[in-house]
Image (cartoon, rainbow, N blue to C red):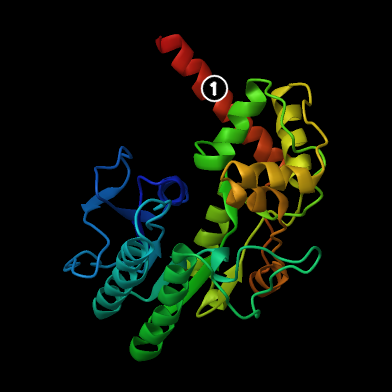
Amino acid sequence: MRLFVTGVTGFVGHRVSYLACKDGYQVIGQSRSQSTQNRINHFSADINPITNWDSAFKEVDCVVHCAARVHQMSGPLDQIESLYDEVNHLGTINLAKQAAAQGVKRFVFLSSIKVNGESTVLERPFIVKHSCTPTDPYGVSKWKAEQALKQVSKDTGMEVVIIRPPLVYGPGVKANFKSLLNWIDKGIPLPLGAINNQRSMVYLDNLVHLILECCYNPKAANETFLVSDDYDISTSVLLRQVAKSMRKSNRMLPIPEFWLKLGLRLVGKEAVGLRLCSSLQLDISHTKKRLNWTPPISFAQGVQMTVDAYLEDKNDIGRCK
């Protein structure tokens, strides 16, 4: 099978292309900069509404669309919305229409659970049939892309598969998860010991395993799938697991959630408090039943491999100084 993978220099796209090559797929990888992977054919292009993808999809069976604009936090709201929409919505549809016109049979789209919303009531997880209520520009752009892709599928016959992951972690993870690794590694006391929420996450290779499953499984055609490690945890349990994997002492302070949120609000970090304390659970029973699929790597294994990679990178940097 011949795959066209977008965003091959990104966190998810890089791993998709690497494991796809390892499994015997032929891979063409798109990115704006040259990929360091030797086993893929590189296609340099931007994801936007006007890119000409002529000849990009020659003999391609499936497009795996991982590229997206993320973490666009600064600027006026209308400008932020426009930037997200240009890449995540309009750029995606331009890509999909040209893929269909060139005979691509299937288009796997990496969306986001933000399409469903930012949080769930405890023990009432999102299911794939829930109505979608995205609240931020990123989630809205992904939701608009999903709707437009379904129309492209209806108009052209190209099969579309949509995957909505929650937070993705694994070797090389950045942003908030890496900050947590840094804090625990440095032994910084964290006021998060009393948080009793429940959150779904997905280990990188579990997500990639599902993505590749969706490239060829006939039962994936024109379906939407939620994905996670199938193991929900609280913020405090996550941090304890990371500390255990690092062989660090647990230095969490049991500050009541009310006071934690109030303190963060007073310093202008109310959104951080909501992310740390709220629940966000996914029910992946439809995914497991429809595809006869289960996450191959456990939460504990995923955290351990993430920590091991973090420590190895840290030691490599130390040796270079």
Q: Nearer the viewer, residue 20 or 273?
A: 273
Q: Nearer the viewer, residue 187 or 40?
A: 187
Q: Position of residue 69 (x, y in %)?
A: 37, 56
Q: Position of residue 19 (x, y in %)?
A: 47, 47
Q: Nearer the viewer, residue 44 or 56?
A: 44
Q: Position of residue 264 (x, y in %)?
A: 64, 43
| Residue drawn where x is 63% and y is 27% of the image | 183
On screen, residue 38 above or below 130: above
Q: In this rendering, does residue 139 appear at all? A: yes
The quarter of the picture where the C terminus appears is top left
Looking at the rendered structure, the number of numbered marks drawn on it comes to: 1
Asked if residue 3 lies left or right of residue 130, the reply is left
Q: In this rendering, does residue 298 appear at all? A: no
On screen, residue 202 above or below 227: above
Q: Position of residue 209 (x, y in %)?
A: 56, 55
| Residue drawn where x is 51% and y is 78% of the image | 221
Disc 1 element: helix
Near mark 1 (Cα within 10 A), the count class, few <14, some 14-19 or many ≥20, is few
* Residue 309 placement: quadrant: top right
Q: Amino acid at mark 1?
A: Glu
The quarter of the picture where the N terminus appears is bottom left
In the rendered image, the residue lying farthest to the front is: 266
Asked if residue 159 lies left or right of residue 278, the reply is left
On screen, residue 144 above or below 284: below
On screen, residue 182 above or below 93: above
Q: Nearer the viewer, residue 36 or 282?
A: 282
* Residue 260 placement: quadrant: top right
| Residue drawn where x is 39% and y is 46% of the image | 10
| Residue drawn where x is 62% and y is 81% of the image | 131
Disc 1 marks which residue? 312
